[in-house]
Image (spheres, rainbow, N blue to C red):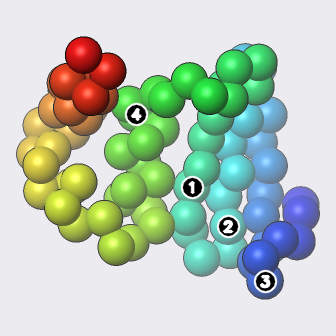
Amino acid sequence: MVEAGGRTWWIHWHDPHFRCESDAGVVVEAHIYSPDLIDPGFLLEYARTAGGHEAVLSACPAGFHDIARLLDLHQA
């Protein structure tokens, strides 16, 4: 458990990822060895739990499939 930004965060380590979940239910998950890599599933879960990202959620009605495609378009 970690206190940061006025929130309590629980850290769940499952190599090669770690998942942080706040007491407000916000989930942030990242690759331990390459934190700059963006995982579509992790990004979508953050958008669902953090609030304020309705545009992302509405652009991804098929969930993982859609967000992966959006990330591919962004990288092209």
Q: CA distance from mark 2 to mark 3?
A: 10 Å
Q: CA distance from mark 1 to mark 4?
A: 11 Å
Q: Which residue was labeled with disc 1?
A: 27
Q: What residue sits 56% from the left and 24% below the top?
A: 37
Instruction: Name the residue beneath numbered marker 4.
Output: 41
Amino acid tagged 1: Val
User: Closer to us: mark 3 or mark 1?
Assistant: 3
Where is residue 63? Give x, y as percent: 21, 39
Q: CA distance from mark 2 to mark 1?
A: 7 Å
Please identify the quadrant where the N terminus is shown.
bottom right
Q: Does residue 17 appear in the picture of this structure?
A: no
Query: Disc 2 vs disc 1: Cβ atoms closer than 8 Å?
Result: yes
60 lies left or right of 40:
left
Q: Helix, strand, or loop for circle 4?
A: helix
Identify the residue under disc 2.
22
Of callouts 4 and 3, the N-terminal one: 3
| Contact between labelled residues 3 and 4, with CB atoms less than 8 Å apart | no
**What is the secondary structure assignment of the residue under circle 2?**
strand
Residue 8 falls in image quadrant? bottom right
Vertical position of residue 46 compared to residue 51: above or below: above
> Label 2, label 4: how many angstroms apart (C-alpha)?
18 Å
Task: Describe residue 29's horizontal placement relative to residue 66 as left or right.
Answer: right
**Which residue lies most toward the bottom here?**
6
At x 36%, y 59%, the residue is 48
Quickly name the residue at label 3: 6
- For the C terminus, the image quarter is top left
Closer to the chain start, of discs 2 and 1, is: 2
Relative depth, front residue between 65 and 38: 38
